[in-house]
């Protein structure tokens, strides 16, 4: 086992460079590798300063953000999605502390301390990082593992409010730390994802599906079928996006996700009303032929928007599987067409690009309109994540990247168009 000071020495001497290059320097540039190494050193030095350079068993851990590629609002209806880990992540240096407590200092936030002898949900911790740590610990203990405390210093490059799911990245990070120190590495990425979802549902208070955690924990591009949410079918799609001739961009429209709870809830509620017409809990259990045959009755009973949102589910559920097939076949042109079709369906049928509560704020439709002009019939662009505000996603031909980035930032402000890479590894131990 390395001490923290030994870990810092290994990092500075380049001993971890191959691992760092695989996670952070996916564009192959020395600059990105230098930046990654410097960040890892800074993280380990922050740990040494706070908890001691002689801490035994020190290691670096990563929980990546994730991008949704296909299947917009399909997971909560037990549908299919396509998502991927990205090269923006939460990074932590951690080491066992021999105590019955977890102590985490996240850069820019107050330190938190969680007693492992009290893992019951706390109402006052809802919507906090403490809830996620306590929930992850509780589920791992429930699975029969003996817990022991650790100290950690963490920082994040996952963009706030970007739809890249910082909460899933944090859950994946904490799950991997516990797995390394307490479980002998026996927890596989799918199990860690389920643990993260449990923490978010039960402790954090957010009734999310499992897509975010899967995208963060599993790594690379993954196709997920949630027909049985307790045992989802997860398949890696090992397509090399660097050879596609396109760059993945996430564009921040700088519109707020605040006060959008009712908009998100309405999507689930209206899809649920359609499925309830057939005596089912989710649309995946309703045959599409039965849904289409009942359109006149559903319009009267549920309203047109609910019918359109259900129509989006069936189409985007199918598209998510088709996107995965296109990538496996190496047909990127077909893939882009499906991404564009998904984006159009989200705008017209799902209707999650702006909120009826604030019709003057239509940053996502405006960003999509300008993106379409800049792409000029090439690439693809769509709403990213839950929608109503936040970000759009674009696959931009490399030859148009500079024009696209400058055009989007002229509209939305400097630093709003972020270039991302899909990384091949999900949550992991980076170095030890």
Image (cartoon, rainbow, N blue to C red):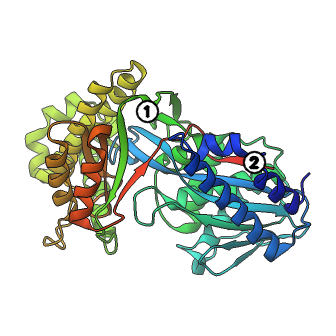
* Residue at the spot 64% in from the left edge and 81% down from the top edge: 110
Characterize the local packing of mark 2: few (<14), some (14-19) or many (20 or more) Cα atoms within 10 angstroms: few
The image shows residue 213, relative to residue 43, as above or below, that is above
Is 107 positioned to the left or the right of 319 in the image? right
* Residue at the spot 32% in from the left edge and 46% down from the top edge: 72
Estimate the spatial distance between the alpha carbons at disc 2 and disc 1, rounded to whole Å. Answer: 27 Å
Query: Residue 405 appears at what percent x and percent y?
Result: 29, 54
Q: Nearer the viewer, mark 2 or mark 1?
A: 2
Q: First in sequence: mark 2 or mark 1?
A: 2
The image shows residue 303, relative to residue 68, as above or below, that is below
User: Residue furthest toward the front?
Assistant: 30
User: Residue furthest toward the top?
Assistant: 329
**Front position in the image: 38 or 349:** 38
* Residue at the spot 80% in from the left edge and 75% down from the top edge: 49
- Asked if residue 302 can be seen in this view, the reply is no
- How many numbered badges does the structure rendering display? 2
Q: Secondary structure at mark 1?
A: helix
- Asked if residue 155 can be seen in this view, the reply is yes
- Quarter-of-image position of residue 258: bottom left
**Front position in the image: 333 or 262:** 333
Q: Which mark is residue 332?
A: none
Query: Residue 17 appears at what percent x and percent y?
Result: 70, 44
- Quarter-of-image position of residue 254: bottom left
Q: What residue sits right under mark 1 in the picture? A: 241
**Front position in the image: 379 or 207:** 379
Query: Residue 322 appears at what percent x and percent y?
Result: 33, 26
Q: What residue sits right under mark 2 in the picture? A: 14
* Residue at the spot 56% in from the left edge and 40% down from the top edge: 219
């Amino acid at each position: 086992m390395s001490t923290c000071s030994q870990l810092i020495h290994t990092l500075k001497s380049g001993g971890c460079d191959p691992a760092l290059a695989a996670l952070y320097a996916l564009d192959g540039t020395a600059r990105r590798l230098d930046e990654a190494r410097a960040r890892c050193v800074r993280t380990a030095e922050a740990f040494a300063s706070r908890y001691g350079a002689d801490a035994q068993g020190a290691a670096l851990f990563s929980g990546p953000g994730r991008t949704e590629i296909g299947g917009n609002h399909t997971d909560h209806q037990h549908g299919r999605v396509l998502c991927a880990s990205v090269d923006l992540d939460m990074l932590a240096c951690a080491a066992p502390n021999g105590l019955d407590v977890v102590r985490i200092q996240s850069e820019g936030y107050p330190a938190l301390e969680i007693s492992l002898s009290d893992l019951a949900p706390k109402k006052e911790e809802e919507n906090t990082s403490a809830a996620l740590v306590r929930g992850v610990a509780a589920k791992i203990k429930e699975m029969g593992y003996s817990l022991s405390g650790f100290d950690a210093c963490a920082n994040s490059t996952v963009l706030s409010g970007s739809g890249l799911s910082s909460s899933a990245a944090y859950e994946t990070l904490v799950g991997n730390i516990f797995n390394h120190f307490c479980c002998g590495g026996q927890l596989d990425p799918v199990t860690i994802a389920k643990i993260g979802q449990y923490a978010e549902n039960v402790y954090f208070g957010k009734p999310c599906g499992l897509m975010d955690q899967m995208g963060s924990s599993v790594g690379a591009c993954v196709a997920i079928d949630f027909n049985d949410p307790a045992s989802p079918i997860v398949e890696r799609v090992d397509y090399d996006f660097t050879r596609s001739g396109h760059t993945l961009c996430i564009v921040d429209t700088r519109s707020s996700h605040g006060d959008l709870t009712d908009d998100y809830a309405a999507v689930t509620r209206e899809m649920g009303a359609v499925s309830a017409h057939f005596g089912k809990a989710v649309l995946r259990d309703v045959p599409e032929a039965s849904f289409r045959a009942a359109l006149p009755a559903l319009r009267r009973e549920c309203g047109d928007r609910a019918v359109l949102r259900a129509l989006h589910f069936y189409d985007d559920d199918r598209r998510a599987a088709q996107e995965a097939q296109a990538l496996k076949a190496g047909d990127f042109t077909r893939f882009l067409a499906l991404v564009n079709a998904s984006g159009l369906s989200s705008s017209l049928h799902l209707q999650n690009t702006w909120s009826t509560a604030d019709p003057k704020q239509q940053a996502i439709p405006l960003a999509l309109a300008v993106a379409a002009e800049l792409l000029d019939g090439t690439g693809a662009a769509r709403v990213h994540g839950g929608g109503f505000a936040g970000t759009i996603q674009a696959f931009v031909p490399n030859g148009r990247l500079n024009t696209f980035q400058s055009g989007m930032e002229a509209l939305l402000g400097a630093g709003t168009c972020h270039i991302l890479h899909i990384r091949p590894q999900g949550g992991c131990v980076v170095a030890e």
